[in-house]
Amino acid sequence: MRTLAPLLVIALALPSSTRAIDASDLVERKTLEAALFLAGPGLATLPIELASSTPDGASQGVEGWTIYRADGQSERILIYTGSGIFRCARWPHDRLLSHECLVRLASVIVHEVWHFRYGRREADAYGAQILFLLANHASPAQIGAVQTARDRVVAAARKPAEAVKKQP
């Protein structure tokens, strides 16, 4: 009987750690579901997944991205659970702050859905995101943060194009 006792303790410890992981996954899924509800009813059928890490070479502050196949067609959307906006929106939280973050997270989904449906043009995806924020009465700070991100991305895209134009 002595040899069974340590095994019993180990066996009992495993389910609780599994439950902790399942609880965290459940909170993340509930957060995504709430953001999808705000983003729009038709979006829940799209291939949207949660990601716990960012892709290699991702820009600082990445909140979501779209994966494309080799032929250029969109494959799926990933939402980064480690982003500040996802952590802020995590269910359940302070209702006022959480709702504001949830609207912003929903806007990230809208941005990525634009890419999924229409392609890689960042300015247009940011435009859809900003319109969503305006329609959902997001705070000026939230809208301003997205506008700043759009301006930074658009400016970065212009630099290579301007360099090509200047070549003889």
Image: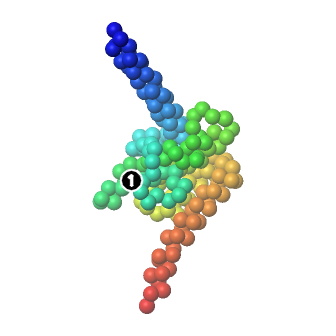
The front one of 91 and 59 is 59
Rendered location of residue 166, percent (x, y): 48, 86
Residue pointed to by mark 1: 67
Q: Is residue 120 visible?
A: yes
The front one of 67 and 60 is 60
Query: Which of the image's four quarters has the C terminus?
Result: bottom left
User: In the rendered view, would you say 109 is above or below 155?
Assistant: above
Q: Residue at x 47, y 33 (%)?
A: 25
The front one of 44 and 147 is 147
Which residue is the extreme one toward the bottom?
Answer: 168
Picture quadrant of residue 143? bottom right
Q: Residue at x 68, y 53 (%)?
A: 141
User: In the rendered view, would you say 87 is above or below 157?
Assistant: above
Query: Which of the image's four quarters has the N terminus?
Result: top left
User: In the rendered view, would you say 2 is above or below 150?
Assistant: above
Rendered location of residue 99, percent (x, y): 64, 39
Rendered location of residue 133, percent (x, y): 61, 50
Rendered location of residue 123, percent (x, y): 52, 63
Q: Amino acid at mark 1?
A: Ile
Which residue is the extreme one toward the left?
Answer: 71
Q: What is the secondary structure assignment of the residue under circle 1? A: strand
